[in-house]
Amino acid sequence: MTPSFDHLVKQLKKLPGLGFRSAERIALHVLVEQPDQMSGLVQALDSASKRVKRCVRCGNLSEEELCGICEDSRRDESVLCVVEQVPDLLAIESSGSFRGLYHVLHGKLSPIKGIGPDKLNLESLEKRLNEGKHSEVVLALGNDIEGEATCYYIMDTLIGESPIKVSRIGFGLPSGGGILYADQITLKSAMDGRRSYHR
Amino acid sequence: MTPSFDHLVKQLKKLPGLGFRSAERIALHVLVEQPDQMSGLVQALDSASKRVKRCVRCGNLSEEELCGICEDSRRDESVLCVVEQVPDLLAIESSGSFRGLYHVLHGKLSPIKGIGPDKLNLESLEKRLNEGKHSEVVLALGNDIEGEATCYYIMDTLIGESPIKVSRIGFGLPSGGGILYADQITLKSAMDGRRSYHR
């Protein structure tokens, strides 16, 4: 089209979930259809990139030293939920199934990708665990190889002999999913994780 | 989440094709996962919004006075294709089915939405038609009520008694679509637009 237009489409295409068509559609939208939205968008990107940083305690997004969850005195600080990424935290929050505090690792161990313990937010997790405020840790990491390795590292190196109760989130059939459609690993997790029927 | 983050998600949600989930995913991407892409994106938006304007002749996007298509001497300037929006032009271009010049109206007539002839890029169309360079006009506008009204206006007011040959793009069954799945209006267009079978 034009050099700046093509460059914009190329930049937009890098965003997750956008292909060439949707990137082109968005570029046309902000340039032709709704140019008045452009400055608002640029400002919002700019100000978010300047203001949003990591909570120094848990690694969640925050504009202050501590994030809204760490600051919230109504949360149960005895339980700590360890997640890989901020989106995982958001998903658990929106399910309303957890009222404790979080710790975001910002990745998982992967020797193949060269991600060792020093690349993850683990030092501050160790510090938090040593403070003795948290009596329970829920490891909400995936059950792929890297998730398993990360859980093992946390158990072995950070928890060690400490009396902290550690659990992993349950794996099994997703709600609404039939046995017919589940893959082998999910079925194995569901079998391994079976619970006695209360009657 | 945080005020700047929520504001960014709100701005992103205004873009076409993005819902809350995809906007949130993009915001997390540029803030947490790939913060190095942020400045490139902001710059691309900013520079495109400053540089990209309308071709003074045809209304297509351009960074110069005239767009690449108007400047291209290999195009057949005897045929003019009138489209509603820039995306329509892009779609026809990528089909490779047209080698003439374009004229982008940037909308269609709609008394209900208060869009009269003065709101569209019609004045320059009239000027181009009066120049006498174009012997054929293809109206590539939709066959909804507003598209029909716009075609009628162009025929009645701009073409009038002039000897210019005017046609509308064909309507009918989309390629690969079965008769079974076509809606009534499409089937009617396909019947009305039937062509004699050459053998």
Image (spheres, coloured by chain):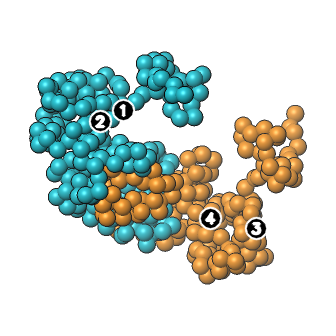
Chain colours: A orange, B cyan
Q: Residue at x 70, y 79 (%)?
A: A111
Q: In this orientation, which residue lies closer to the viewer: B154 or B39?
A: B154
Q: How many labels does the image show?
A: 4
Q: What element carries label 1?
A: loop
The residue that mark 1 highlights is B169
Q: In this orientation, which residue lies closer to the viewer: B122 or B164?
A: B164
Q: Is mark 3 on a helix, strand or loop?
A: helix
Question: Between marks 2 and 3, how big is the CA–CA gap?
Answer: 60 Å
The residue that mark 3 highlights is A145
Question: Between marks 1 and 4, how big is the CA–CA gap?
Answer: 54 Å
Chain letter belonging to callout 2: B
Residue A84 seen in the figure: yes
**Which class describes the residues within 10 Å of circle 1: few (<14), some (14-19), or many (20+)?**
few
Q: Which of marks 1 and 4 is in front?
A: 1
> From the viewer's perspective, is B52 left or right of A138?
left
The residue that mark 4 highlights is A84
Percent x, y for residue B58?
21, 47
Q: In which quarter of the image is the N terminus of chain A?
A: bottom left
Chain letter belonging to callout 3: A
Q: Residue at x 33, y 35 (%)?
A: B140
Instruction: Determine the image quadrant of residue B47.
Output: bottom left
Type of residue at label 2? Val
**Which class describes the residues within 10 Å of circle 3: few (<14), some (14-19), or many (20+)?**
few
Q: Nearer the viewer, mark 3 or mark 4?
A: 3
Q: Do labels 3 and 4 share a chain?
A: yes
The residue that mark 2 highlights is B138
Q: Which residue is drawn at 36% across and 58% down?
A: B4
Type of residue at label 1? Ile
Reply above or below: B166 against A75. above
Type of residue at label 3? Ile
Q: Nearer the viewer, mark 4 or mark 2?
A: 2
